[in-house]
Amino acid sequence: MQHEGREIWMVQTKRADFEGLSKKLGVSPVSVRVMRNRGMETEEEMRRYLYGTEKDLYDGSLMLDMDLAVGILEEKLKKGAPIRVIGDYDIDGVCSTYLLLRGLKRASLAFCGSEGRIDFVIPDRIADGYGVNIAMIRQAVQDGVDTLVTCDNGIAASKELALAKEHGITVVVTDHHEVPVNENGQVLPPADAVVDPKREGETYPFPEICGAVVVYKLLQVLYRRAGILEAEWRELLQFAAVATVGDVMKLQDENRLIVKYGLRQLSRTPNLGLRCLAEKNNLNLEALSAYHIGFVIGPCLNAGGRLQTAKLALRLLQAGTKEEADRLAEELKELNDMRKDMTARGEAEAVRQVEEQYGEDKVLVVFLPECHESLAGIIAGRVREKFHKPALVLTKSQEAEGMAKGSGRSIEQYHMFQGLCEVADLLPKFGGHPMAAGLSIEEKNIEEFRRRLNENARLTEEDFIPRIWIDVPMPFEYVTEGLIKEFQSLEPFGQGNEKPLFAQKNLLIRSARVFGRNRNVVKLSLVTETGVPVDGILFGDGDAFLEKQAGKERMDMVYYPDVNEYNGTRTLQAVIKNYKLS
């Protein structure tokens, strides 16, 4: 719930023939307007969005080097060569590693009747850092590994992979991150094949996929070569969907279809690990949404890599017995609960620092020496949300005395990576993009870092006022159960395909009461200007709302319509996201 306060409500004003498209597509003009606001322009795009199926997913072989990569793997599998998968410790890396291990073993079985010699390594977040490192390459040489396959990393590991090549190791890179550039353009690592949809001249239609989807596409081509039924490949879609949501990819184009149909698969998944994880978190697999993956399942799978080892999450996905799956799911849930407590403590301390010391700063830099370094990004996101300012959270580095590590999260108006480039002389290591970044810095330079970032920031007071984007200023009188059902066909909602928001002004507040164990639900009885009663529900601090509402009789609301079912009676209600009282 966004409380009443400084925020600007804006109505989207993209144009289209709403009536005409509505007739052609068989949906209301409101749904057409929502799709137009999400960037769709043509009837064909909207039709695919509404009625697309798994058959509309793009073919993996459209990706540069894909056929080359699959050819290499086919040859190695047929020879029984030792293959090592190098993954990553986050949810995308774990799902990619799981898919690659499962897919390579299955293809090996098809090619030569055995599961082959395939193993894996996942870096430790604190001891190894992200991606391939020199120690891993040396270990691979020592272990007699013939072929390395990276997933969700590798595109920036030129130095490390050059060492592998010097030792005669075959290297296949699969990744989805930006390709490093120099004055001559993109710099690809010295691998035998590089599959990354962000490559220059890429022929794949949609580059915004995660690492697990790149692997999923590789398996599509590999299974085809091995004569494995397409249905077997399709069964793996659920893992690509979990990674897409967990890695916060935009739910647009192909990603939305992957998640839509992946969620359907998850509802009847035979995977013991996912079933037990849902059970431990009281989730009904048959009613799973992208929200549940993003905020419940995903954080549990990530908790291992944050606080212990990502191998826990991988072992959970691979679990062969109910007992093993149960034990690992319990362990990951406990780790995630611990992570939540640690995050809450870190967030409280960060907010205190900002309120007491840095309230005037344009770019918030907070140092939390006691905080676990894997939580810096989550806390930076919360601080950014609370103050609507770019936020960087620094923690003590575990690796080197006197060093700090940090993560930043930004607002639309501030290009964080650019901001860090301007103070690069203070940062031994940093990377990122407009909305997020990671860095390391000497503790003694933190004050200077804060001062210079703020001096350089070309942000105005206006930039710190959150903007609430409204799809349609639609009176609640227009809402029907049919319309709410129609909005369900716009799901799954998430990053890049946000839940539609509607607005209505000047409702009379007849009554407001607070309930819920934590007094965090407000039930409102409202009346529109035309005299139509509206049930409203608001989630947040109920008592704070009553305090603000004292003496005020009218409300403007930004809402999403919903059906409330209680004792067999169905009533329409407005789930209020933002409000203004008068």
Image (cartoon, helix red, strand yellow):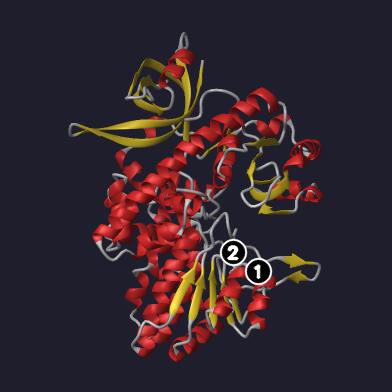
Residue 208 image point, x, y percent? 56, 61
Compared to residue 168, the image places residue 483 above or below, namely above
* Camera sees residue 505: no
Residue in front for this viewpoint, 265 or 549: 265
Amino acid tagged 2: Gly
Tell me if 446 is positioned left or right of 69 in this view. right
Tell which residue pokes out farthest to the top in this image: 551
Question: Could you say which disc has been placed on residue 520 in the image?
Answer: none
Mark 2 Cα shell of 10 Å, populated few (<14), some (14-19), many (≥20): many
Residue 148 location (% of width, % of height):
55, 77
Residues marked 1 and 2 touching at CB (< 8 Å): yes
Q: Secondary structure at mark 2?
A: loop
Q: Is residue 497 above or below residue 167?
A: above
Residue 371, percent from left and from top: 57, 39
114 or 480: nearer the eye? 114
- Give the residue pinned by disc 1: 157
Quarter location, residue 537: top left
Residue, disc 2: 131
